[in-house]
Image (tube, coloured by chain):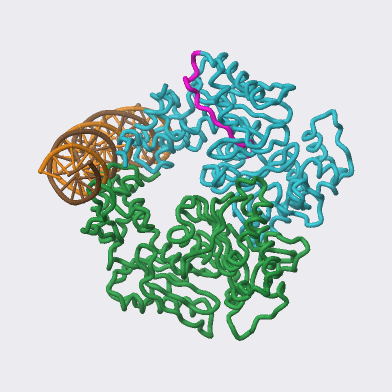
Chain colours: A cyan, B green, C orange, D brown
DNA sequence: TGACTTTGTGCCGCTAATGAACAAAACAGT
DNA sequence: ACTGTTTTGTTCATTAGCGGCACAAAGTCA
């Protein structure tokens, strides 16, 4: 048995991470709030903020943030300009990339169309190049680079399973390929050497984004369900961390049965949540056909808002409700966030959706879970930024490395 | 805002709890193993074991525990006789109660038939009385009392929802009622004053028991599915802690649809996991009738082992497989433990069950999750003991209180 | 018997966080 | 305007947990 490698100071100031998380998510706007949220003394909170300021991660506003009586507290904010991370997202329409600061704000964003050649190296190379250009064009230190993919991504090895949109072989080692492309890119002088990279599924990252900066704030068990171009994605955040299961494949909710006699699904079953509540399902229910020249998702969202399609919307909403009820019975979340097409279904018939869920939940209590629309724009990018920030939120002193 | 109440020493020795957990579950049989498992120095592991010994929770065997070369390590064991907790379980056939030490061992067990009057106060009073008798008859200090119920139990308020077996109104405040009955019982001079009590669902507690002392050891995400007299129960242990959702009602898996055209279920649907894989379902599939004079579960388990009922067993196994596959797609556990009637179904057709699960799992990788039989006898009682120990596993110094 | 390997322990130092006292900056009432 | 009152921020000494190191102890192996 080897002697432990970890020394006492390596454990680090244990409050530094939690404190930065609270400031990052806006839950601790002042030192005083931080004192309460961390349950420590004012002296400790003061020392911790001082250290975070010294690390260049936050700034303390000198102007007093007025309020009630007593000495006013100073406002804590994310440093601006401070360090940044790169975030990117692959989707059916193309590639998005952004430079992101702490606090969930995207500083700069670019969108590229999908190249003709969508082989993994090629596509990931384009992502790395887009990020590198953003990095070179910024004065900020760049600390990480994370990518959101529409595929399921295994953990801990980081391979992508059967993509719906690109013709990647199942098992493509995206984490390694992406790391290699980033390592080969010219990120400019202000990027951390050996820039840490990470890859994850976009629905998972959207859930993270909503939990920290959107409709899922301070939910303890947040379930996100989304419908993109094709297929339904789910994600669960438990106590602030993603629940991705033992190999990253949890919350693959697309093949939950919601209509025994429903539409056939490629999986061989009938009435899967995928086949009943995605864009195609809505068009089929409305007996319409999408215009092949325009983006499918946008057309479907329009259709969901069209009063003339109300019957079709209700049909799909009912099936979505059955799916959500099934998930509630298993996961018992305290909030559900819907995004993508499902957001519009919720907007079109919120009461009906809530009623279906409540009716099919075994115990009234868990059926009354609030179902709310997603709030974060570009949630995939924001979530990827969260993933890139994660190591520094766990240990802010890591910004000193390299 | 009040000043923090918690002082530095109150945070306590943070390693004490983890160390006791490791010894409790048998994962750290020696100081050396503890050193490795906690990732600390030998000096620290030594100090921690010394403190746990001083608290009377463990003992260090003076005889060397031989092995390879080098100085032999001393064996760490749970103190015997050491402190104990009371555990009890309510089930269709009666009341069980036990005195339990650390290490998952039941020291003494009693079983009582169900009284004629099953009103909550009456039944919980009988449980408290049974526990009190065990406490008075033992020389050990008694530190807690936990109860396993066949009902879903809400958190954090501790009310029981619709019992299948007793005629309790949904919403019965079992946690409070049980605490009151225990407070009123004469527990003898060696019970901790204001004995802490806890109540939880039996499937959840069985999962805890299997995770710590049975077939679920060192699984990171353990799913347990069980079929008792009627109805199917599920539970999930994530990283050593029960996942009970935001209000304690997670893993209510009984109404997952596994056969669109299947048997009708009281819930209004058809083909629920309950209706397709419980004792009644097996008898129906075999076109037999249970003898009303004998316990239903025992007869069903016999039937599952009967070669002449092989066709019926396969029918039910297929549906169980579909249910498990659905859960795997959502939860992505790395092990599944089956108990109750499902244990016998697994024993009768293990390969078929595994094949069905693998076939319906979206990604082969997650379909290959091992499905194993439960190992812990009286898992409900052992799990209740775990629940009663929980505060002391979190903070061993709590044994000093009162 | 002696070299080697692994385990256990005493001592020192480092560090995170407390607690108390004090200073600062606002409001409230006279 | 002056003077409490309330809340926030900081300084400083103290404390406790844990790592590192050196050394002792107790076996195996050659």
Q: Position of residue A307 (x, y in %)?
A: 85, 43
**In this picture, is A92 found above or below B123?**
above
* Residue C30 found in image quarter: top left
Q: Position of residue B243 (x, y in %)?
A: 52, 54
Question: Can the viewer see residue A78?
Answer: yes
**In this picture, is B120 found above or below A240?**
below
- Quadrant (top left, top right, bottom left, bottom right) of the N terminus of chain A: top left
Residue situated in front as seen by the camera: A180 or A9: A180
The residue that appears at 33% across and 35% down in the rendered structure is A5
- State which region is magenta: A189-203
Q: Position of residue A92 (x, y in %)?
A: 73, 30
The residue that appears at 52% across and 59% down in the rendered structure is B155
* Residue A200, magenta (yes or no): yes
**In this picture, is B213 found above or below D22?**
below
In the image, taking residue C27 as reference, residue A330 lies left or right, namely right
- Quadrant (top left, top right, bottom left, bottom right) of the C terminus of chain A: top left
The residue that appears at 72% across and 68% down in the rendered structure is B265
In the image, taking residue C20 as reference, residue A146 lies left or right, namely right
Residue situated in front as seen by the camera: A184 or B127: A184
Residue situated in front as seen by the camera: B310 or A265: B310
Q: Position of residue B36 (x, y in %)?
A: 34, 45
């Amino acid at each position: 048995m080897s002697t432990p490698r970890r020394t006492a100071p390596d454990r680090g100031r244990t409050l530094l991470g939690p404190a930065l998380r609270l400031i990052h998510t806006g839950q601790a706007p002042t030192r005083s709030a931080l004192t309460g949220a961390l349950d420590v003394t004012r002296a400790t909170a003061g020392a911790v903020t001082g250290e975070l300021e010294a690390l260049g991660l936050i700034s303390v506003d000198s102007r007093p943030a007025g309020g009630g009586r007593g000495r006013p507290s100073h406002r804590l904010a994310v440093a601006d300009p401070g360090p940044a991370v790169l975030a990117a997202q692959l989707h059916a329409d193309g590639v998005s990339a952004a430079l992101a600061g702490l606090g969930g704000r995207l500083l700069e964003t670019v969108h590229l169309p999908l190249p003709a050649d969508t082989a993994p190296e090629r596509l990931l190379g384009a992502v790395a190049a887009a990020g590198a250009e953003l990095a070179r064009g910024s004065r900020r230190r760049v600390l990480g680079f994370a990518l959101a993919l529409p595929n399921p991504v295994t953990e801990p090895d980081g391979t992508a399973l059967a993509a719906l949109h690109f013709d990647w072989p199942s098992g493509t080692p995206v984490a390694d390929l992406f790391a290699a492309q980033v390592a080969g890119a010219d990120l400019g002088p202000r990027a951390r050497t050996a820039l840490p990279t990470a890859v994850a599924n976009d629905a998972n990252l959207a859930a993270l984004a909503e939990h920290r900066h959107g409709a899922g704030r301070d939910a303890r068990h947040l379930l996100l369900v989304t419908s993109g171009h094709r297929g339904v994605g789910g994600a669960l955040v438990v106590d602030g961390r993603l629940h991705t299961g033992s190999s990253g494949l949890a919350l693959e909710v697309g093949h939950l049965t919601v209509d025994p006699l429903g539409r056939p699904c490629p999986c061989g079953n009938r009435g899967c949540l995928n086949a009943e509540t995605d864009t195609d399902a809505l068009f089929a229910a409305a007996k319409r056909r999408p215009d092949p020249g325009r983006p499918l998702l946008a057309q479907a969202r329009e259709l969901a808002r069209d009063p003339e399609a109300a019957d079709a919307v209700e049909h799909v909403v009912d099936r979505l409700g059955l799916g959500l009820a099934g998930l509630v019975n298993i996961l018992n979340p305290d909030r559900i966030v819907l995004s993508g097409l499902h957001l519009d279904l919720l907007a079109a018939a919120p009461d009906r959706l809530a009623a279906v869920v409540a009716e099919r939940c075994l115990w009234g209590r868990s059926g009354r879970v609030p179902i709310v629309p997603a709030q974060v724009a570009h949630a995939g990018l924001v979530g990827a930024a969260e993933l890139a920030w994660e190591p520094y939120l766990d240990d802010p002193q890591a910004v000193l490395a390299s």
